């Protein structure tokens, strides 16, 4: 029998709400080709719509036909950009990126878009959503010397490979480099005049093409989700196909196939990652989640008085469960929409008092009632355990947990920063053991078959690895080294030395290194009346890809974190 004590059945009250890593997606990408339009502002609003996909850093690169300017910084989109910054980014082509790290630590260098000057001439700016599985093998193929990598991400590695190719054009370089990449990648990249987008042969993460119909000369948008197209007033045209690269310039949109398609779209996008107002493969994410809730009610009925969701990601499935079960739906938990990540660790006194930063129960709704509590997933179980105790303290007669995904038993190597397998509560524990650990009256997950059916996609066209351990892209040993596998290690002087040392140590098996944050509920939920407009005033553009001196009020990261000794010459304001 697995040891359930390791799941922390009796921690200090409230402590779980501070320190549980949950699933995080890699990034959101957004590209614009629109002569005559304010492409920086379009990219800003597109990234604002994709903020849920990454909250560590944001950046925009703009090309004007001759040069590319890159501005990026750690923080949320609305914190990184203001009106002055955006007004200084002029041009007709833009690449935007919002990041959560799944390869490389959370430092300024690792923020995107990444930038290089190509061997065949001209700038390259690139944004990446996903995770490569052969990053170490690719890095070993770069020219000797660790200065070939300016950052410690697979995204910078891709940019370096494109820049090092002999060309003669970026399209030629991409068609040579893309077939060498393994794993998940949805890319948006540009030179000074042309926008490019590419999706891995498995199409693991979404990437869509849209058009601004009223633009007289034609204007095109590429984004991680259809919701971002809606935000900027673009019309959905189609998905970028697995194994396809598209090129957008004054001649229009051209398609190139660099690899045979073998679709395996990420099933967890439907569960949690994508916005509910997004469509994937023609299927509404919201409708999928409601149908999953209905299926969950059919598979795991229970007598109860009220169905409540764990906000916000549990709401659609809870609606479906309530409809199918004929049980009233209600809001039993209040979420503080303004609490994002906290890096201020609570004292033991605060932990013992059970301060609830994010969720608080409505006692008058809960007291004396038998509750069905619907959540999207369980990773470690700490948040659900705290919720069960919270609801009982508020007077709930019974607490029945229903999860709108199957048990997460395996880590993801394709762009979701799941905990290591040892930290996944379902990796070696059965449903009854997990129920007892959570302290719930009952626990049930939707079946994998039920979830797949709700997606309206064939099972063989989906990546289900986190649920069944079947990885569509074979994993090398280096792929299992973790997100920091390109970070500097003691005694390593070159890329080859660093890789050899990391392989020798094998210190970080799995996708570990996630920031401490509650299970599944650390997304940035903006209030309905929040104004997404960029801030007025602020600092001018003083930091490009290569890090010019910061302006007033912007302190540079410590030298130890910026790897200044390995940085090229400052050239960030305008790149030729």
Image (spheres, rainbow, N blue to C red):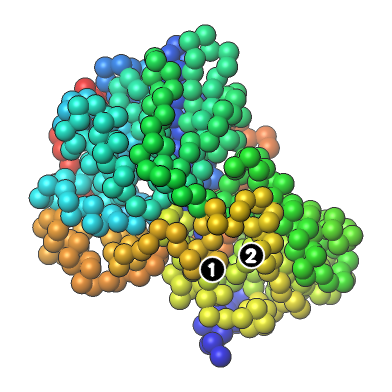
Residue 257 horizontal side relative to residue 134, left or right: right
CA distance separating discs 2 and 1: 9 Å
- Quarter of image, res 237: top right
Helix, strand or loop at label 1? It is helix
Residue 377, located in which quarter of the rendered image? Answer: bottom right
The foreground one among 267 and 387 is 267
Q: Residue at x 46, y 72 (%)?
A: 421
Residue 516: x and y, percent?
Answer: 47, 62
Q: Residues within 10 Å of mark 2 (few under 14, many from 20)?
A: some
Q: Residue at x 10, y 50 (%)?
A: 144
Question: Which residue lies under the disc numbered 2?
Answer: 448
Q: Nearer the viewer, residue 385 or 265?
A: 265
Which quarter of the figure has residue 425? bottom right
Q: Earlier in the sequence, mark 2 or mark 1?
A: 2
Look at the image and tell me whether residue 436 can be seen: yes
- Can you say whether 102 is above or below 519 in the image? above
User: Can the viewer see residue 315 in this picture?
Assistant: no
In this figure, which residue is indicated by the disc labeled 1? 468
- 234 vs 444, left or right, is left
**Residue 120 falls left or right of residue 427:** left
Q: Where residue 8 appears, x then y in whole percent?
A: 55, 80
In front: 359, or 498? 498
Residue situated in front as seen by the camera: 62 or 411? 411
Q: Dot 1, crowdedness within 10 Å: few (<14), some or many (≥20)? A: some
Measuring 27% from the left and 71% from the top, which residue is drawn there?
A: 506
Looking at the image, how many numbered discs can be counted on the residues?
2
User: Where does residue 416 sit, x and y in percent of width and height?
Assistant: 47, 56
Secondary structure found at label 2:
helix
- The image shows residue 49 at horizontal and vertical percentages of 56, 36
Badge number at residue 272: none
- Image quarter in which the N terminus is found: bottom right
């Amino acid at each position: 029998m697995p040891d359930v004590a390791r799941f922390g059945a009796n921690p200090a009250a409230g402590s779980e709400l501070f320190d549980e890593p949950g699933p995080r997606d890699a990034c959101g990408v957004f590209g614009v080709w629109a002569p005559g339009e304010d492409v920086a502002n379009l990219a800003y609003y597109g990234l604002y719509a994709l903020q849920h996909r990454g909250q560590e850093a944001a950046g925009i690169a703009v090309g004007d036909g001759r040069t590319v300017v890159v501005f990026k910084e750690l923080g949320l989109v609305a914190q990184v950009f203001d009106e002055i910054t955006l007004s200084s980014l002029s041009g007709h082509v833009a690449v935007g990126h919002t990041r959560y790290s799944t390869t490389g630590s959370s430092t300024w260098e690792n923020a995107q878009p990444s930038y290089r000057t190509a061997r065949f001439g001209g700038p390259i700016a690139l944004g990446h959503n996903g995770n490569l599985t052969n990053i170490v093998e690719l890095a070993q193929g770069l020219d000797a010397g660790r200065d070939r990598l300016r950052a410690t991400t697979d995204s910078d590695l891709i940019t370096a490979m494109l820049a090092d190719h002999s060309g003669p054009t970026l399209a030629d370089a991409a068609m040579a480099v893309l077939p060498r990449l393994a794993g998940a990648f949805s890319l948006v990249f540009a030179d000074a005049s042309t926008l490019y987008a590419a999706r891995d042969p498995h199409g693991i993460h979404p990437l869509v093409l849209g058009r601004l119909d009223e633009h007289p000369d034609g204007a095109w948008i590429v984004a991680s989700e259809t919701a971002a197209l809606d935000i900027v007033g673009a019309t959905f045209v189609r998905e970028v196909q697995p194994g396809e690269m598209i090129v957008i310039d004054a001649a229009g949109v051209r398609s190139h196939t660099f690899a045979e398609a073998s679709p395996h779209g990420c099933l967890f996008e439907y569960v949690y990652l994508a916005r509910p107002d997004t469509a994937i493969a023609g299927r509404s994410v919201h409708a999928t989640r409601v149908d999953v809730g209905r299926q969950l009610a059919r598979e795991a009925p229970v007598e109860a008085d009220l169905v409540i969701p764990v906000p916000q990601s549990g709401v659609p499935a809870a609606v479906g469960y309530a409809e199918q079960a004929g049980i009233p739906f209600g809001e039993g938990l209040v979420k503080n929409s303004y609490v994002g990540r906290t890096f201020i660790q609570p004292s033991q006194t605060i932990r013992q008092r059970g301060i609830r930063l994010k969720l608080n129960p409505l006692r008058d709704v809960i007291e004396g009632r038998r509750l069905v509590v619907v959540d999207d997933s369980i990773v470690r179980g700490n948040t659900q355990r705290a919720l069960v105790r919270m609801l009982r303290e508020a007077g709930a007669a019974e607490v029945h947990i229903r999860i709108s995904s199957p048990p997460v038993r395996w880590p993801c190597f394709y762009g979701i920063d799941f905990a290591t397998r040892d930290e996944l509560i379902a990796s070696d524990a059965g449903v009854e053991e997990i129920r007892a650990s959570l302290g719930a009256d009952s626990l049930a997950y939707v079946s994998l078959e039920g979830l797949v059916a709700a997606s309206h996609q064939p099972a063989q066209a989906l990546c289900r690895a986190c649920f069944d351990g079947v990885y569509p892209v074979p994993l090398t040993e280096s792929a299992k080294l973790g997100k920091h596998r390109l970070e500097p290690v003691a005694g390593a002087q070159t890329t080859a030395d660093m890789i050899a040392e990391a392989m020798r140590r094998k210190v970080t098996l799995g996708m570990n290194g996630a920031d401490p944050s509650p299970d599944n509920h650390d997304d940035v939920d903006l209030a309905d009346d929040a104004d997404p407009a960029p801030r007025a005033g602020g600092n001018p553009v003083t930091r490009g890809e290569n890090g010019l001196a910061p302006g007033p009020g912007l302190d540079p990261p410590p030298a130890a974190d910026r790897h200044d000794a390995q940085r090229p010459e400052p050239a960030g304001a305008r790149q030729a």
